[in-house]
Image (tube, rainbow, N blue to C red):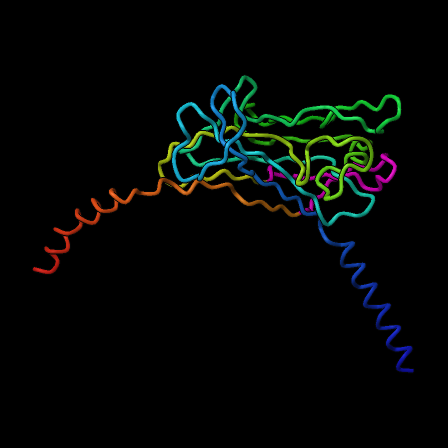
Amino acid sequence: MRSIKRVIAGVVGGLALAASAASAAPLLTVNPVYVGTVPGDFSTGPVMRPLTSATPAGAFDVFEVRFSLSNIAADEDFATMNIDIAATPNITFGNFGSGPWNAATGTYDNNGGLPGGGATLWDNGNSDAGPSSVDLKNISVATFASAANNRQYGEAVRPKAGTDDGLGFPTLIGTLYAQYNGNGPGTISVGPSVGTFLATWVGNSSGGGANTSQSGATFGSTPATYAGAVPEPASLSLLALSALPLLRRRRKA
């Protein structure tokens, strides 16, 4: 009897865990990641530096915007996201003609060595779709069902088939070129756009899933930060000396 009860308890517990996993809301995590600083003429690649001082004159600090998608079913894939990017006033972004959002671009082969198979990344769009192309509001990134099934955007194991596309994991969606003036702490943050910010392809194991808005999805992000200028030892000594008269007056009082 006890053995039967244990079996029943195990089955019930397993069903409860399965139901809990199935009901978990998808989690979209989007982070700006500092990858180095480049000269204004882009003559050399990014070089890492401590983000404690102003961006060197004419240069740009490069931040890649990358995402991961978790708490999804085995046959569920990324479809669309809508995000906003904001920065403190001491940070500006380079605009190279199409606004500060630089979408990840490129091509890949979706079937490896077989004939044909050439495809374009983010085939359903990747752009700043807000009121202005320079406001970094409502950045829309999307892909069609067949490409989503093939690429597995945002998932730890990707792609499902074909050649590597260079986007990695977390998956690269775009790049920002920032200039920080060094006046106080600075922050670059990513948040969800107003309304439903995520859709997925549900039942997409063969690339013919249903585009489903995920109104219950959750969003996660860690801002990129500049610490602000760190005073040099000489500056700290001057600051200490300037405070001495004030301390003397207080003692006399």
Q: Say whether residue 78 is left or right of residue 140.
A: right
Instruction: Say above or below: 110 vs 43.
Output: below
In depth, the one of 110 and 143 nearer the eye is 110
How far across and down, in percent of the image, does residue 90 sit? 40, 33
- Residue reaching furthest left? 252
How far across and down, in percent of the image, does residue 131 sit? 56, 25
How far across and down, in percent of the image, does residue 210 sit? 82, 37
At horizontal 54% and vertical 17% (from top left) the residue drawn is 97
Quadrant for the C terminus in the image: bottom left
Which is the main secondary structure of the residues drawn in magenta?
loop
How far across and down, in percent of the image, does residue 62 sit? 52, 31
- Residue reaching furthest bottom? 1
In depth, the one of 182 and 130 nearer the eye is 182
At horizontal 60% and vertical 37% (from top left) the residue drawn is 193
Image quadrant where residue 16 sits: bottom right
Instruction: Say above or below: 20 vs 139.
Output: below
Does the magenta portion include 205? Answer: yes
Quadrant for the N terminus in the image: bottom right
What's the magenta region? Answer: 192-217
